[in-house]
Image (cartoon, rainbow, N blue to C red):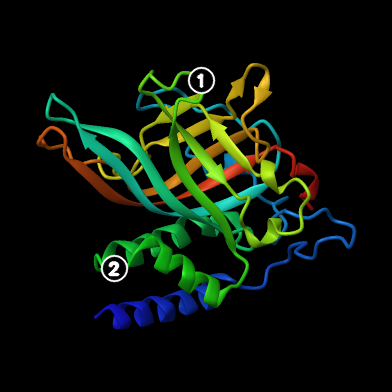
Amino acid sequence: MYAFAKLLSALSLLAVANAFYVPKARANTPPANRPTGGSICSTTAFLVETVIPADINDNGGEPFPPSPITTYPTYTALSVGTQNYTCGDDGAWTGSGAITYLYDISCLPLDHHQPFTSFIAALWDAAPPTVTAADIVALTEQVNPGVGYGIHYWIPDPVNATSGNIYAKWDFSQSERMENDTNKANAYLVAGESANVPAPNDPSVNSNWLVEPVLVINGKKAGQLADQVFRINSNGGQAPNTTCTPGTDLQVKSTLDFLFYGGAWADTIF
């Protein structure tokens, strides 16, 4: 069953590559003098305002800004993994972080990101428990070598470890594209949160859309990967609206997109 699931996923991903990676009239050839560490394809056609619903702020939460801090993203990433929860003393699920794997989707037109992400989510949701997000990473790398960015997870409060707060972190430092980059040790980001709204579709199932600015500690940015992150196109990730046994843990499959703005690699945009 495990081998069959891997084969099925591999064939599905090949079909996705053929279906979605279609030729487009885009400047996808980077200049010869381009710095290392950037996206595979051009991101100058990616205006996130065009894919965020006009009524995104109508259902409460901390509102989305009208636009990101820069016009174009430095990176666009598909995220596949789990969002994690712990049951509190009140019998309700509380977010305890996430662990997901990240892939470069800059070669897809922006309006294809949402259907592509939903397609991958369907594969991930259908995979049996023996198939992990790391397996999906390995299969994707076989189909499209070099698309792996790195990993996303959460860490304890870097300012006050006893606060009980957790912060999102993205780490590209071990990715293939950073291999020869002299600044690869800083290819990470720890972020706070400035916007948090319900997902436009099925918010009881799909995790909230977020805007996450880099955390500044004692006047220094916590990483140089980006200055702001948009989290959109969520599929799954929400804890069930049920009571639970205090102290138990839960992993919920999650597939979504991140767009990274600014940062030390902004000069790689072409």
Q: Which residue is mark 1?
A: 159
Residue 61 shows up from this direction? yes
Residue 104 shows up from this direction? no
* Vertical placement of residue 233 versus 54, above or below: below
Quarter location, residue 73? top right
The one nearer the camera, 218 or 117, is 218
* Residue 269 falls left or right of residue 160: right
Residue 119 is labelled as: none
Q: Earlier in the sequence, mark 1 or mark 2?
A: 2
x, y percent for residue 201: 34, 44
Secondary structure at badge 1 equals loop
Q: Are marks 1 and 2 in contact (CB under 8 Å)?
A: no
Q: Residue at x 23, y 36 (%)?
A: 86
* Residue 265 falls left or right of residue 164: right
Quarter location, residue 60? top left
x, y percent for residue 90: 13, 24
Quadrant where the N terminus is found in the figure: bottom left
Secondary structure at badge 2 equals loop
Q: Which residue is mark 2?
A: 127
